[in-house]
Image (cartoon, rainbow, N blue to C red):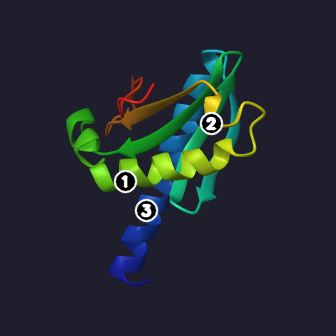
Amino acid sequence: MGRRTSQGSVSYHAGHAAELRVAADYERRGFSIAHRRWRGAGGEIDLIARNGSGLVFIEVKKSTSFESAAARISQRQIDRICASAAQFLENEPGGQLTNVRFDAALVDGSGAVQIIENAFGHA
């Protein structure tokens, strides 16, 4: 396996492990994971969690530190996630009026998780 392919595989598995850790964190807090890696026209949403009050669209970022993980979320990516979330809501009973939140779940090099609720500023 070439270096690029090997690095890609390591990144994929590290990202998957980070998503599993974040999903478990949300489940411990009473959420159910409705979808993992849901793909809409705008792009992929890492996790979609549901509880009695609505939905949480979660972007998971893993890096060596929380700060570097947060820095990897671009405005373009936020816009694409929001577009995919709007598409997802078309099939919800409340449609666009569904109570939603956009969280950033940051995972550092040790595997610790930091959740930033309403990270994109949308309520």
Image quarter where the C terminus lies is top left
Q: Which mark is residue 10?
A: 3
Nearer-the-camera pick, 115 or 113: 115
Q: Secondary structure at mark 1?
A: helix
Residue tagged 1: 77
Nearer-the-camera pick, 52 or 99: 99
Disc 3 crowd rating (10 Å Cα; few below 14, some 14-19, many 20+) is few
Residue 78 lies left or right of residue 27; in this view the side is left
Name which quarter of the figure residue 27 lies in.
top right
Ranked by sequence position, the earlier of labels 1 and 2 is 1
Q: Residue furthest right?
A: 93
89 is higher (above) or lower (below) than 39 = above
Disc 2 crowd rating (10 Å Cα; few below 14, some 14-19, many 20+) is some
Residue in the picture at 47% in, 46% down = 82
Disc 1 crowd rating (10 Å Cα; few below 14, some 14-19, many 20+) is some
Residue in the picture at 33% in, 79% down = 3
Ranked by sequence position, the earlier of labels 1 and 3 is 3
Whether label 1 touches label 3, CB < 8 Å: no
Q: How many marks?
A: 3
Q: Residue furthest bottom?
A: 2
Where residue 8 appears, as percent x and y from the top left, is 41, 69
Q: CA distance from mark 1 to mark 3?
A: 22 Å
73 is higher (above) or lower (below) than 31 = below
Where residue 99 appears, as percent x and y from the top left, is 60, 24
Nearer-the-camera pick, 5 or 118: 118
Three-letter amino acid code at the position of disc 3: Val
Three-letter amino acid code at the position of disc 1: Gln
Ranked by sequence position, the earlier of labels 2 and 3 is 3
Residue tagged 2: 96
Nearer-the-camera pick, 20 or 35: 35
